Image: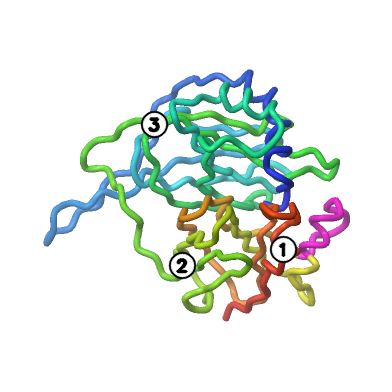
Amino acid sequence: MFSLRPLSSVLLVTAGTLAGCKSDRPSPESAGASASSAQAPKAAPTTVTVQAKDFAFNAPAQIPAGAVTIRLENHGKEIHQAQLVKLEDGKTAQDFAAAMKNPGPPPSWIKYLGGPNGAAPGQEVSTTSVLEPGQYLYLCFIPSPDGVIHAAKGMVRPFEVVAASTNAANSQPETDVTIKLVDYDFQSSKPLAAGKQRILVENMGPQGHELVLVKLAPGKKVEDFASWAETGLKGPPPAEPVGGVGVLDKGGWAVFTADLTAGDYGLICFVPDAKDGKMHLAHGMMKNIKVS
């Protein structure tokens, strides 16, 4: 979310935290399959509850592969996210920690897969993705008012995705709206409407992007939220985050669910640009929208 600076430097501060992480391997959480009298039973996504507090995640250390809905509950006093990172090529959290001690861009085996973005205190948000077996991390890149990102304060959680049963859901769920992320815009298939809806977010750009959805305070614009976030979260927030999707690599997708009331909202991306290091919002990747 709005914590993101150049990813190589941001992730560097998580190295010490990751090096000490261990898996306690509790039993996976899963959702049952739904059945139809006219068709063969169709599996529902696995549902995993991730509890965030100041400053740690409480979550299963092992979940089954396939379509997974991650429900982030914020039990803390600050805004939190659960950025999903996959470690490929057999790499582990310890490999990630070691790699982050080196300057330069993250290695190619580090993949950004979205995850729930921006849950306000006392709120919950969720995303659905298809996860393959392997090693993963939850991370929170959001900073505290002191400027230190939450991952550096302990908000790092390794987990493993393991092979699932043959009837596990493994495809993209049905959605109501599609928002495409490009350099540097949000392109929606139709306006967002009041009520509950499933929003597919696809990264069609050549570099990583995120989507932060905020509900604006009366008289405020998304530019006010950007300024508040960039200047240290001082004073009353001009908007409240109501979900979205964390950083997605090129070609990535995730679905998030939003239950919106009528009013003014904003879309914004805080990811640093691959060319000049400026946040994408500085390139125009923020948009005021109206929900009715």
- Tag of residue 197: 2
Q: Residue at x 77, y 63 (%)?
A: 225
Whether 268 is drawn above or below 62: the answer is: below
Give the CA distance from mark 3 to mark 1: 38 Å
Q: Are marks 3 and 2 in contact (CB under 8 Å)?
A: no
Amino acid marked by disc 2: Gln
Does the rendering let one see residue 124? no
- Tell me: 248 left or right of 270: left
Asked which secondary structure carries label 1, the reply is helix
- Tell me: 263 left or right of 228: left
Q: Name the residue carrying label 3.
A: 28
Q: Name the residue carrying label 1.
A: 281
Amino acid marked by disc 3: Pro
Amino acid marked by disc 1: Leu
Q: Is residue 233 magenta?
A: yes
Q: Residue at x 61, y 65 (%)?
A: 183
Q: For the view shown, which residue lies furthest in the left direction?
A: 38
Q: Residue at x 61, y 69 (%)?
A: 185
Which one is in front, 121 or 153?
153
Q: Which residues are magenta?
A: 225-238
The crowding category of the residue bearing disc 2, from other C-alpha atoms within 10 Å (few below 14, some 14 to 19, many at least 20), is: some
Badge nearest the viewer, 2 or 1: 1
Which one is in front, 105 or 111?
105
- Tell me: 132 left or right of 266: left
Q: Quadrant of residue 37?
A: bottom left
- Tag of residue 215: none
Asked which secondary structure carries label 3, the reply is loop
Give the CA distance from mark 3 to mark 2: 27 Å
Whether 65 is drawn above or below 273: the answer is: above
